[in-house]
Image: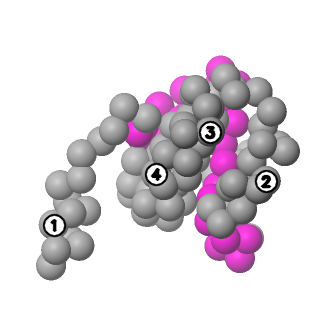
Amino acid sequence: MKTIFKRLFRQMDSYDIDMESLNKMRLHGAKIVDVRSRREYSEGHISGSINIPDYEINREFEKVFKDYNQTIILYCRSGARSKKACKKLIKKGYTNIFNLYGGIDN
């Protein structure tokens, strides 16, 4: 019950966006990163996204995205893993990191 309550009433953070915003940002060059596992990614993903699983964010992200000001949108199934990954990347100094609120299950 507590988990359901948290999910229903979780507030959006400043870096949370919806699918409509993702599509608009993509048109202006935003990169999209799926933080789910490789297996989950292979079962279906947002077209044009790349896969960097959340458990590899610390070691792989900077190899792919060297520009800390590039606009990057993270997503997962529910939005929980991508939200955690956003927080890690913001702490590393990335300035234009966004999270697909609610993930791709919404």
| Residue named by callout 3 | 92
Q: Nearer the viewer, mark 1 or mark 3?
A: 3
Percent position of residue 22, x then y: 53, 36
Residue contact between numbered discs 2 and 4, judged by CB atoms under 8 Å: no
Nearer the N terminus, badge 1 or badge 3?
1
**What amino acid type should be assigned to the residue bearing mark 3?**
Lys
Q: Is residue 60 left or right of residue 26?
A: right
Please tell me whether mark 4 sits on a helix, a strand or a loop. helix
**Residue holding disc 2:** 60
Magenta stretch: residue 100 in it? no
Whichever of labels 1 and 4 marks the residue nearer the N terminus, that label is: 1
Which quarter of the rendered picture does the N terminus lie within?
Answer: bottom left
Q: State the residue position of label 4.
A: 83
Q: Which residue is mark 1?
A: 5
Disc 1: CA contacts within 10 A as few (<14), some (14-19) or many (>=20): few
Q: Amino acid at mark 4?
A: Lys
Q: Which mark is residue 18?
A: none
